[in-house]
Image (cartoon, grey):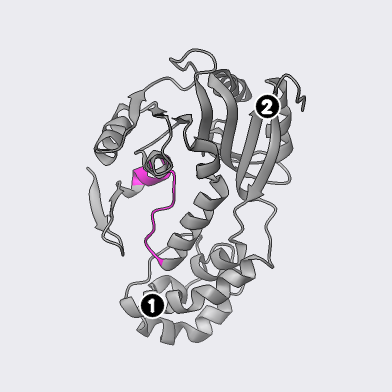
């Protein structure tokens, strides 16, 4: 069942059970100052105003519709979303109440739309969970078939392909070459540069755990989770007090300035592809 969290500006943000969040929510749920910063930075990279305004848009794998709601702010001519899960589509229809968007259940490997139906097709965090290359090929074919001009893929990438259970980080070059076979050409790609802030606020792959041990009594009194007393596990736990949340807010400007210095070459990547034009080949 959906639950609700009132944001700082009074907006209602719909949350799913923890077991469903990863597969259903496309944009990071803004629970902390760092989450808000990361979400806003990703939205800026998507450049939705330039690509979606006045155009027909389809999102494949729309989940609960959080990205569709963001796209709707830029007045697209038409806005559609499809997902394989009837439950997620039901949630999306509730979440998008009052938004001019059509969502439906569909097989993403065999989309129910004619060729070149949409000016822009957006796919976020779908390919990285498709493990079989034949299925990747099929999904990519469908994405390109229904796009009239633009395709935006938002996927985790890496310099060398990395496989984990249920998850693959492919290379940008892999996406580039596969899309080129469909006559779509990579025009631009951008990494979500949050390496420094993620290091500071999430404890993922942080080798300097001894620093937290030294300051753990102070951090514990401020309301930070008990995980500061342990080696990092890779999980993101919320600060347990207003003081801890406020401390993150105060330190965020310094940490975000480091994101421009410590650039990343992997992770969340926004890739923009354009269909080959008659007088613009590649």
Helix, strand or loop at mark 1: helix
**Is residue 54 or residue 220 the one in the foreground?**
54
Q: Residue furthest top?
A: 114
User: In the rendered image, which quarter contains the N terminus?
Assistant: top left
Q: Residues within 10 Å of mark 2 (few under 14, many from 20)?
A: many
Camera sees residue 166: no
Q: Residue at x 70, y 23 (%)?
A: 276
Magenta run includes residue 160: no
Magenta run includes residue 31: yes
Q: Position of residue 155 (x, y in %)?
A: 58, 41
The residue tagged 1 is 246
Q: Position of residue 15 (x, y in %)?
A: 30, 49
Q: Residue at x 39, y 54 (%)?
A: 29
User: In the rendered image, which quarter contains the C terminus?
Assistant: top right
As drawn, 16 above or below 275: below
Rendered image quadrant of residue 197: bottom right
Q: Which residues are magenta?
A: 19-32
The residue tagged 2 is 179
């Amino acid at each position: 069942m959906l639950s609700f969290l009132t944001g700082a500006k009074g907006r209602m943000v719909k949350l799913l059970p923890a077991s469903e969040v990863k597969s259903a929510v496309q944009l990071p749920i803004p629970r902390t100052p760092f989450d808000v910063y990361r979400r806003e930075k990703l939205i800026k990279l998507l450049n939705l105003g330039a690509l979606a305004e006045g155009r027909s848009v389809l999102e494949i794998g729309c989940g609960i519709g959080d990205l569709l709601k963001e796209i709707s702010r830029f007045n697209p001519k038409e806005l559609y979303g499809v997902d394989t899960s009837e439950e997620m589509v039901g949630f999306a229809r509730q979440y998008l109440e009052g938004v001019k968007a059509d969502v439906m259940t569909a097989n993403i490997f065999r989309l129910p739309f004619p060729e070149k139906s949409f000016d822009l097709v957006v796919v976020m965090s779908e390919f990285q969970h498709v493990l079989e290359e034949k299925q990747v090929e099929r999904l990519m074919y469908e994405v390109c078939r229904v796009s009239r001009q633009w395709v935006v893929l938002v996927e985790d990438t890496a310099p060398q392909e990395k496989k984990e259970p249920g998850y693959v980080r492919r290379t940008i070059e892999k996406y580039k070459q596969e899309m080129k076979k469909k006559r779509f050409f990579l025009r631009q790609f951008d990494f979500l540069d949050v390496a420094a802030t993620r290091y500071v606020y999430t404890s993922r792959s942080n080798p300097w755990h001894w620093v937290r041990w030294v300051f753990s009594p102070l951090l514990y009194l401020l309301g930070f989770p008990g995980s500061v007393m342990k080696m990092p596990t890779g999980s993101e736990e919320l600060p347990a007090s207003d003081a801890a949340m406020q401390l993150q807010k105060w330190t965020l400007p310094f940490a975000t300035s480091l994101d421009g210095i410590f650039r990343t070459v992997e992770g969340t990547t926004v890739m923009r592809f354009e269909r080959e034009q008659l007088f613009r080949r590649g």
